[in-house]
Image: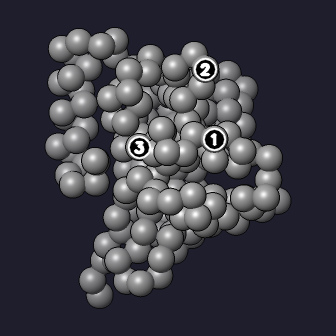
């Protein structure tokens, strides 16, 4: 059986952002939807932070199977508001691909870090494997400062991610 192809890309519209938020929110207990207050920051980020609003889309016609949704805080750092994948596509590196794509976008925008709040103990290891550090439910990934090292890191991640990074 062929492996399902999943494309990671920025959302194309506010309506698609809402659908992505709903799919991601359905993965949580209790579930949340775009009617939730957490959606407000993301809606406000449209379209300026479009590169941080990522959708995972199935190539089999199943549509949206997840996403990683972030925005720039007033400090200029990036906040990963939420990330989630449909159970049928988990365990294939898509979560890593979503976060790495968001990190490339954050570095391109000049952010010094990517933060994630509300991280549950069960998912803390996922963030730690991606280089995030923190205490409690707050995790942060410090990014290389602007310059040659950052540029090399962006190129390396883009190459590893292939055509999934705009």
Which residue is disc 2 drawn over? 74
Which residue is disc 1 drawn over? 44
What is the distance, in whole Å, between disc 3 and disc 2 at their CAs? 17 Å
Q: Secondary structure at mark 2?
A: loop
Q: Position of residue 161 (x, y in %)?
A: 25, 49
Quadrant hosting residue 148: top left
Q: Is residue 137 left or right of residue 143?
A: right
Quadrant hosting residue 163: bottom left
Quadrant hosting residue 111: top left
Which mark is nearer the camera, 1 or 3?
1
The residue shown at (34%, 16%) is: 144
Label 1 neighbourhood size at 10 Å, few (<14), some (14-19), many (20+)?
A: few
For the N terminus, the image quarter is: bottom left
Disc tally is 3
Q: Secondary structure at mark 3?
A: helix
Label 3 neighbourhood size at 10 Å, few (<14), some (14-19), many (20+)?
A: many
Q: Position of residue 34 (x, y in %)?
A: 72, 59
Residue 99 visible in the snapshot? no
Q: Secondary structure at mark 1?
A: helix
Q: Which mark is residue 75?
A: none
Which residue is disc 3 drawn over? 51
User: N-terminal of the two: label 1 or label 2?
Assistant: 1
Q: Is residue 7 left or right of residue 159?
A: right
What is the distance, in whole Å, between disc 1 and disc 2 at their CAs? 12 Å
Camera-nearest residue between 42 and 157: 42
Camera-nearest residue between 95 and 50: 50
User: N-terminal of the two: label 1 or label 3?
Assistant: 1
Q: Position of residue 27 (x, y in %)?
A: 67, 63
């Amino acid at each position: 059986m062929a492996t399902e192809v999943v494309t990671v890309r920025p959302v194309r519209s506010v309506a698609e952002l809402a659908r992505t938020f709903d799919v991601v929110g359905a993965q949580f207990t209790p579930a949340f939807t775009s009617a939730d207050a957490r959606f407000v920051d993301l809606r406000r980020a449209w379209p300026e932070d479009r590169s941080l609003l990522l959708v995972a889309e199935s190539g089999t016609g199943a549509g949206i199977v997840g996403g990683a949704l972030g925005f720039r805080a007033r400090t200029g750092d990036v906040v990963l508001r939420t990330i989630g994948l449909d159970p049928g596509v988990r365990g294939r590196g898509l979560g890593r691909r979503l976060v790495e794509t968001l990190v490339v976008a954050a570095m391109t925008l000049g952010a010094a870090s990517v933060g994630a709040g509300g991280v549950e103990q069960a998912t803390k290891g996922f963030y730690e494997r991606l280089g995030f550090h923190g205490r409690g439910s707050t995790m942060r990934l410090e990014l290389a400062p602007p310059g040659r090292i950052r540029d090399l890191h962006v190129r390396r991640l883009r190459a590893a991610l292939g055509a999934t990074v705009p």
